[in-house]
Amino acid sequence: MKRASSFDAVKSQSGLTLVELMIAMLLGLILVGGVTGVFLSAQQTYRVNDSLNRMQDGFRVGFQLLTRDIRNAGSSGCTNNGRVVNVLAGNAWWADWGGSNFIAYDGDATHPGVAFGDAIGDRVQGTSAIQMMYSLSDGDEAIAIEHVPSGVNASFRIAPGANIAQGDIIMVCDQSQSTIFQVSNITGSGGTNVIHNTGGTVSPGNCTNRLGFPGPTSCSAASGSAYVFPPNAVLSKFESVSWFVGNNGRPETGGRSLYRTWVERGVVIREEVIEGVQDLQFEFLLLGSANFVDTGAVPLNRWLDVVSTRVHLTVEAPHLNPQGGERLSRTLVHEVALRNPVL
């Protein structure tokens, strides 16, 4: 039997040839390239879908919240006959019911409480803004048992447990009229007496404790008309809200957001609601008209004749578009009918 030589052993253990090695490397590169391409394609698809989902969430939340305020605009809780009295001191823009319980401002028109600017929370030039006031009987209101209209303790006696505190801005109403005032104090067991006197304990305070229609012609205790609200008059919190597009200070996500302001005990609070909103525009249908018109075409004396609103909302995706290097952007339109036009 022939024994294997040392040369044969070395030959049997020899590696690949250079050609074989190059072919193997080429096949490996093709395989890695294919896997990488599939991964990148899946990543791009994920980013596009994630951007679209976020944009859809922005539309859904924005339309839902904005629709709620628009539909409630002009509601005084009891009546829409327009007999509304404001006894607050200071002539605050956010409580000017007769002039702006529902009003919009075109892209270049100044909102009295939201200035144009480049700082965080400032309104973006060229975008519209809208302002609404209302008061709702939505389960959080108080029912008057008795009203003492004047004197040191001009007040409403209410059932215990109501969610009303000192400094709250309240709208009280019956079927005859509504009055906006500030709670100067709460007294009694369980907070059963809502005081509406003048004085410096809260800001802005009340000019007078006389709550009748027509309202005070000057800010003095003796001005205004005396009125006794009957039992079962409704006391609910007065809402004054505005919506606008403002700077959010984050250019990597588009730099703009949808903001909402509201009034809490006489203080205007500003809150970022939805990131990525680039533009907000409106169209309005006036009573007796067949066509919607842009914000700037609504006469100042006809805002209370608006019966329906179209909201144009432009939302930009948080991620760059993988194909074009720009963010995806979509504009949707939502129509809202007002519940409380003054007819």
Image (spheres, rainbow, N blue to C red):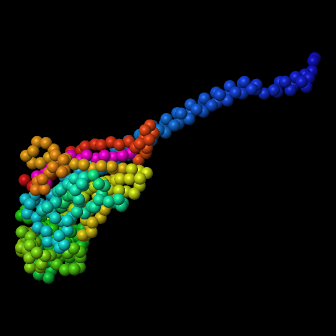
Q: Is residue 43 left or right of residue 126?
A: right
Asked if residue 192 shows in the view, the reply is no
Picture coordinates of residue 129 (x, y %)? 24, 55
The magenta-colored residue range is 303-317
Q: Residue at x 68, y 25 (%)?
A: 23
Q: Residue at x 39, y 57 (%)?
A: 249
Residue at the farthest top position: 1
Picture coordinates of residue 289 (x, y %)? 9, 44
Q: Is residue 331 magenta?
A: no
Q: Is residue 316 magenta?
A: yes
The majority secondary structure of the magenta stretch comes to: strand
Residue at the farthest bottom position: 152
Q: Is residue 31 left or right of residue 296?
A: right
Q: Residue at x 33, y 50 (%)?
A: 277
Splitting the image into 4 quarters, where does residue 209 fall? bottom left
Q: Residue at x 17, y 70 (%)?
A: 91
Q: Quadrant of the N terminus?
A: top right
Picture coordinates of residue 102 (x, y %)? 17, 56
Asked if residue 56 shows in the view, the reply is yes
Splitting the image into 4 quarters, where does residue 189 fall? bottom left
Q: Is residue 244 left or right of residue 221?
A: right
Q: Is residue 47 above or below residue 261?
A: above
Q: Is residue 81 above or below residue 8?
A: below
